[in-house]
Image (tube, rainbow, N blue to C red):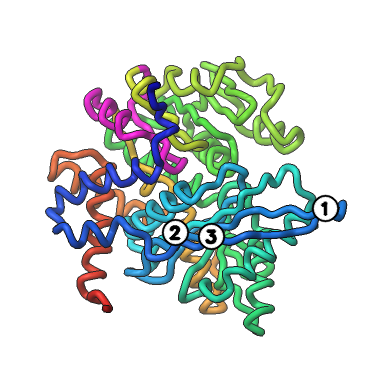
Amino acid sequence: MSTSPRDVSVFGDGITYFKEAADILELDAGMRLILTHPARQIIFSIPFQRDTGEFEVFTGYRVQYSFARGAAKGGIRYHPGVTLDEVTALAFWMTWKCAVVDLPFGGAKGGVTCDPATLSMNELERITRRYAAELVEVVGPDKDVPAPDVNTTPQIMAWFMDTYSMHVRQNVPGVVTGKPLEIGGSRGRVEATGRGVTICALDQMAKMGLKPEQSSIAIQGFGNVGMYAAKLFAERGCKIVGISDVTGAYHNDKGIDVAAAMKYTAEHRSLEGFKGGDKISNGELLTASCDVLVPAALEKVFTAENAANVKAKLIVEGANGPTTPEAANIFRERGVIVIPDIMANAGGVTVSYFEWVQDRMGYFWKESEVNERLEDTLLENLHRIQDFAKQHNTTLRIAAYSIAIDRVVKALRLRGIYA
């Protein structure tokens, strides 16, 4: 029986990219061994009581992959399909994502095997507080700083922060990022990942001679990342020809009215029934005609089966791990440029860093200042990646991994191995 790309470990995909970058850096076997093992993996049960009085038990995870450059950093996702392999892979990617934009963080990720759509607000709060309580000893502003991820929200971060603060008997806003503004959140955080995707895309488009007002964009995923990316692309004059969510994709060669799509989604909680484009499948959207394609939904959407049919000249990875190594090789052979996830969607963690800094200072910046600092940080490091790729005749992905790994390795060598 053949193995589908989704059956292959997502952590295994990350290791494949790591090895190619490690070869360029000529890393020794010992350093490779250290960097391909997480520092800490935590698994625990979360018993809770439903509003009906029934008891259930979910599983909680937190993987702290690296502390070499600072406190671990990474989101918490609530999804029934969360696994240790997935969380480890995401923590692995967070390590390189923080390093590639030169943040003083290591990498982490967490999750709970629940479906928030089936839970009341009271049930969500009880699960979150139990999850936070289980992690009190291993998280903190100088240890591990969680953030929102799939199906988690600023409200969930507020509950996490409050639980931690109650346990340590002092107010600690810096224990999490992605909080509401009223309790220490940062302006610009909600839009940050989508804004980062747009900043990276527009810079690469300029290098490719693609003018925004003459370019077409398709975006798979119309959640927080895809929605704000679409809005910002449209504001720069780009034509959005395709958007999608779990209900399907919507395509319009003349351009989709992004503001209308955002309003429709807010009112109906999905794009189901949206009349602003012809309905097609999510798979068809990936191979639709466009200049720039932004996968901002799931892992492993580009595989050996569909990569040859992708028509976009530029792919900007808003999602984590959307491209399998086999698809990456096909894109390279075809000359399709890919800005990798660890760079393209680093806007969120960059503004999370800004939030952490502001919390520790007790002084908060204007949104214009946040956005200016974000653009400066992303473009400075994207340009390093572009230069490295050109110098070593490699892809932007391997260049990004190489720069990130090199930064972590230098930190490890300077600190030494405590034994």
Query: Label 3 crowding class (10 Å Cα cut-off): few <14, some 14-19, many 20+?
Result: some
The nearer-to-camera label among 1 and 2 is 1
Q: Is residue 325 above or below residue 84?
A: above
State the separation of the CA atoms marked 1 and 2. 41 Å
Q: Which residue is mark 3?
A: 43
Q: Is residue 280 left or right of residue 8?
A: right
The amino acid at mark 1 is Glu
Element marked by disc 1: loop
Closest to the observer: 88 or 239? 88
Name the residue at 45% across, 61% down: 41
Q: Amino acid at mark 2?
A: Thr
Residue behind mark 1: 54
Question: Does residue 369 appear anywhere in the picture?
Answer: no
Q: Which residue is mark 2?
A: 350
Task: Note whether 275 is above or below 373 in the view shown.
Answer: above
Q: Residue flagged by tag 3: what amino acid is it?
A: Ile
